[in-house]
């Protein structure tokens, strides 16, 4: 099996992953997953598509990620991993899609508007 390359995005995070056959090692920006994401929840998010297909110890994943925060980065990696698994075996697509792992979450932070403290919040109105 050759190396499968896919991209996942979430908020302003962009994850490029290289998935190959191996022992289940996940490397993110040249660090181990437990070192990069100390939180068990974020590690779980990244591994969700692999656990769904029982392929946890089947593939090695190398990730280059930039932009965004921890949550956006972990969800961008999850999308990229799911896309890579579909490239390897197209029959897995239905199962991954039903669990929502192939849907690109396009929500981003709305920009701040001039004359307002936040994007939609307005200053208190005073009649007099």
Image (cartoon, rainbow, N blue to C red):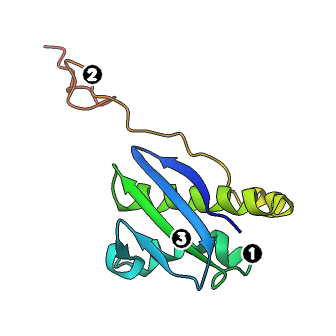
- Quadrant housing the N terminus: bottom right
The image quadrant where one finds the C terminus is top left
**Residue 62 pos. (x, y %):** 48, 67
User: Which residue is disc 2 drawn over?
Assistant: 113
Judge by depth and name the residue closer to the eye, 14 or 64.
64
Q: Give the distance between the C-alpha atoms of the residues marked 2 and 3, in whole angstroms.
A: 41 Å
Residues under labels 2 and 1: Cα distance? 45 Å
Numbered circle sitting on residue 121: none
Q: Which residue is mark 1?
A: 53
Element under label 1? loop
Point out the tag, 2 or 3, that comes first from the N-terminus: 3
Marker disc for residue 61: 3
Between disc 1 and disc 3, whose residue precedes? 1
The residue lying at 49 percent from left, 40 percent from top is 107
Q: Is residue 13 above or below residue 78?
A: above
**Can residue 45 be seen in the rendering of this structure?**
yes
- Nearer to me, 113 or 4: 4
């Amino acid at each position: 099996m050759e190396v499968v390359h896919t991209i996942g995005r979430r908020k302003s995070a962009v994850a490029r992953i290289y998935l190959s056959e191996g022992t289940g090692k996940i490397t993110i920006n040249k660090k181990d997953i437990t070192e990069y994401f100390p939180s068990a929840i974020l590690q779980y998010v990244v591994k969700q598509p692999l656990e769904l297909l029982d392929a946890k110890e089947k593939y090695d994943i190398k990730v280059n990620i930039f932009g965004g925060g921890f949550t956006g980065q972990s969800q961008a990696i999850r999308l990229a991993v799911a896309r890579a698994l579909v490239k390897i075996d197209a029959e897995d697509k239905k199962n991954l899609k039903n669990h929502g792992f192939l849907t690109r979450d396009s929500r981003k932070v709305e920009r701040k508007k001039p004359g307002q403290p936040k994007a939609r919040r307005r200053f208190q109105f005073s009649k007099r």
